Amino acid sequence: MEKMGAVEPTLEQFLEEKKRIRNPLVPVGALMTAGVLTAGLISFKRGNSQLGQTLMRARVVAQGATVALMVGTAFYYGDNPWKKSSRTDTD
């Protein structure tokens, strides 16, 4: 018999909550990318195009590192959004 109001989280919901814990460097990489982008735009506005160009290249490197971290941790933990789940729901 099913209890009314008692909702147990599924394994997928539990793992979804743990993604930030499993992947702590991705938010850091995103903030670094945003910071370098902001600094680059400010330097372009002030007329220092040489520094702005260097910062834009640094932004590309930071952005690439962030994407590589995302892909690497997804591969490490076995997350594959294209793979069908072998579990079937019988609700």
Image (cartoon, grey):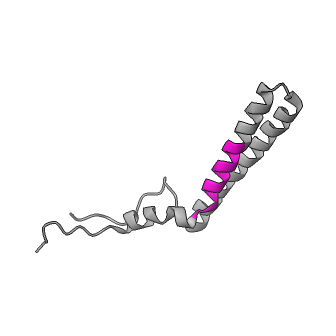
Q: Depth check: 24 or 74 in front?
A: 24
Q: Main secondary structure of the magenta part?
A: helix
Horizontally, residue 50 falls left or right of residue 57, namely right
Q: Is residue 78 visible?
A: no
What percent of the width, then of the height, locates residue 24? 60, 62
Q: Is residue 61 visible?
A: yes
What percent of the width, then of the height, locates residue 42? 75, 32
Q: Residue furthest left?
A: 1
What percent of the width, then of the height, locates residue 30? 64, 49
Residue at image location 48% in from the left, 66% down from the top: 18
Image quarter where the N terminus lies is bottom left
Horizontally, residue 57 falls left or right of residue 23, namely right
Q: Depth check: 40 or 86 in front?
A: 40
Tell me where the magenta segment starts and ends, as one range: 23-35
Asked if residue 9 is among those painted magenta in the image, a careful observer would answer: no
What percent of the width, then of the height, locates residue 56? 78, 37
Image quarter where the C terminus lies is bottom left
Image quadrant in which you'd find residue 37 = top right
Q: Residue furthest front?
A: 46
Residue 83, above or below 37: below
Residue at image location 47% in from the left, 57% down from the top: 83
Q: Depth check: 30 or 74 in front?
A: 30
Residue 12, above or below 36: below
Q: Residue furthest bottom?
A: 1
Image quadrant in which you'd find residue 51 = top right
